[in-house]
Image (spheres, helix red, strand yellow):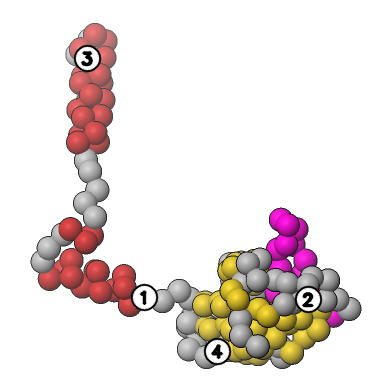
Amino acid sequence: MNCWQYRVGIVALLIAVALGCASYSRVPLSSTTGPKAQELREDRVEQEPEVILEASAVGNRVHIVVKNNRTEPMVVNPYFFGVIVDNKLTRFNPAKVESHFPVFRLEQGETASGYLRFLEFPDLVGQKLVFRNPDYKPLMVIIQAGRD
């Protein structure tokens, strides 16, 4: 095989690969049929996040709920929380945040809840609560309006 034939073969291979990839399209799982597709759809619906974080506020008092769905235990304490206001992160600081959120060690399926009052801010509804446990990826939720 000479150099010219080699080059033609490579070009033909690249064209074939490009055409094959161009004709590939992803089919949404919801449009597939059969028992296996149904199982996959059910698994997708039933699967909860590993950690669920919820936050609601009345003024600067934020009620926090954390649920551990991981198989490993997880520690939750006030130092893992902060708020983002005007794109600036304010971490938990005992001098500036009143805590009614004890330290918890959550097993799989357990939930912890408590309150943090961020004294620097008059109203935290619509702001972001950040949860950063060193053993898990950071989470962020929008603080919803709570009830008195």
Q: Residues within 10 Å of mark 1 (few under 14, many from 20)?
A: few
Amino acid type at mark 3 = Val
Residue position for label 4 = 111
Percent of width and height locating residue 44 = 31, 70
Tell me: 29 left or right of 136.
left
Q: Specify the label residue 118 is tagged with.
A: 2
Q: Residues within 10 Å of mark 3 (few under 14, many from 20)?
A: few
Amino acid type at mark 1 = Gln
Q: Specify the label residue 47 is tagged with.
A: 1
Ranked by sequence position, the earlier of labels 1 and 2 is 1
Q: Which residues are magenta?
A: 81-94
Tell me: 141 left or right of 49.
right
| Residue 90 painted magenta | yes
Ranked by sequence position, the earlier of labels 2 and 3 is 3
Asked whether the residues under the numbered discs 3 and 1 touch, taking CB atoms below 8 Å apart as contact, a structural biologist would say no
Q: Specify the label residue 8 is tagged with.
A: 3
Residue sitting farthest toward the left: 34
